[in-house]
Image (cartoon, grey):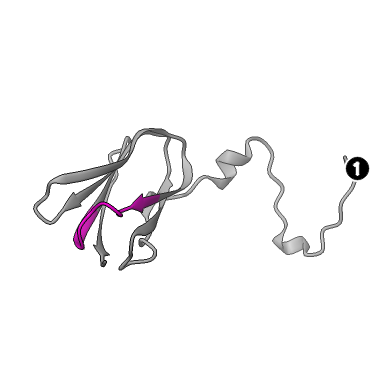
Amino acid sequence: DITDSFIINNVPMASIVVGDIGDYMKPSEFALKSAYPNPFNPTTSLDLSIVDAGLVNVSIFNVLGQKVDELVNSYMNAGYHTMTWDATNFSSGMYFVKVNAASGDVAVQKIMLIK
């Protein structure tokens, strides 16, 4: 069903986008939001905001600095992304999530797995 018209109830809150909506919705800054839940068992979600498209690596490290898992190692478009780490096969303890983006941005976050 195609509509020729629509009603805007709140004009001050309305936005008109001319061009690519993806450019309009693109994050203004790189960020790794707090994992949720944290502490967790056995899965946690990570929200990532990427300003520029490119190669992104998201890896999990143990407290000794050893890489124990890799969630992403691929091209990602600019935008908002959610990843889930399933730590079912890992021991309880503290881990670190490290994000490296093509733009040179890096973020590290501590997460706690409790079984």
The residue shown at (63%, 36%) is 20
The residue shown at (42%, 37%) is 52
Image location (x, y in percent) of residue 41: 33, 64
- Asked whether 21 or 86 is in front, the reply is 86
Indicate the quadrant where residue 57 lies: top left
Image location (x, y in percent) of residue 74: 36, 32
The residue shown at (39%, 51%) is 84
Q: Residues within 10 Å of mark 1 (few under 14, many from 20)?
A: few
Question: Residue type at mark 1?
Answer: Asp
Indicate the quadrant where residue 38 lies: bottom left
- Asked whether 80 or 103 is in front, the reply is 80
Quadrant containing the N terminus in the rendered view: top right
Indicate the quadrant where residue 54 lies: top left
Q: Is residue 63 magenta?
A: no
- Residue sticking out furthest to the left: 64
Image location (x, y in percent) of residue 10: 77, 64
Q: In this view, does 6 lie above or below 20?
A: below
Q: Is residue 44 left or right of residue 95?
A: right
- Residue sticking out furthest to the right: 4
Image location (x, y in percent) of residue 104: 28, 39
SS category of the residue bearing label 1: loop
- Asked whether 10 or 108 is in front, the reply is 108
**Highlighted range, magenta:** 84-96
Quadrant containing the C terminus in the rendered view: bottom left
Q: Is residue 8 left or right of residue 99?
A: right
Q: Mark 1 points at which residue?
A: 4
